[in-house]
Amino acid sequence: MKSKATKYKQRTINVWNEVAPFYHNRWAKNEIGPFSVTNDLIKSARIRSGYTVLDLACGTGLVTKKILTKVGKGQVYGVDSSKSALDIARKWVGKKQNMHFILGDAETIQFDTKFDIITCQYALFFFPNAQKVLKNMKKFLKKNGIVAMSVHGKFNVPYFDSIL
């Protein structure tokens, strides 16, 4: 018998697989709604040329695409559990040698690579075990690395913070 968390994850994946095209065309591509603040997230991350960056729950790739403009020859990894969203991201971002899109679960994914920066835009609340995701972020981060995420604050007003 599947746990509540497993059922929730599967429902969430099914929803995102269905709504990703609409979501991308309506919100992400036009940088409106929750994406109107994406540039602030990127700025707070302090991404530099040569960095290795992980974008957790990358969705259709808006944050990932902006990260690519900052890293130069650095490496960018975008992880999401929605195949539909990743298909859109791959097409929209285009094929780049330093871009790696991975179908995976932020609670269970493993990396041999350590990251200078990890971003996560408006997604932490989707994970049944957000604490596990945060622990993974810490495990994947280089010493003195930065986690930059946007979350909904009080009254659903977006705010930004960096955890050093």
Image: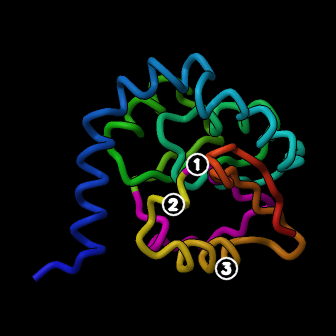
Q: Which residues are magenta?
A: 104-122
Residue 118 within the magenta-colored segment of the rendering: yes
For the residues labelled 3 and 1, the Cα–Cα distance comes to: 21 Å
- Most distant residue in the left direction: 1
| Residue 89 falls left or right of residue 64 | left
Q: x%, y% of residue 26?
A: 46, 19
Quarter in which the N terminus is drawn: bottom left
The image quadrant of residue 83 is top left
Q: Amino acid at mark 1?
A: Tyr
Identify the residue under disc 3.
Answer: 139
Tag on residue 125?
2
Name the residue rendered at 70%, 54% in the picture: 149
Check disc 2: other Cα within 10 Å, few if <14, some if 14-19, many if 20+. Answer: few
Which residue occupies 64% across, 32% down? 65
* Residue at (55% x, 72% y) in the render: 133
Quadrant of residue 38 within the rendered picture: top right
Q: Which numbered disc, 3 or 1, marks the residue closer to the eye?
A: 1
Between the residue at mark 2 and the residue at mark 1, the CA separation in whole angstroms equals 7 Å
Secondary structure beneath label 1: loop
Dominant SS in magenta? loop
Q: Which mark is residue 8?
A: none
Whether residue 39 sits left or right of residue 12 in the image: it is right
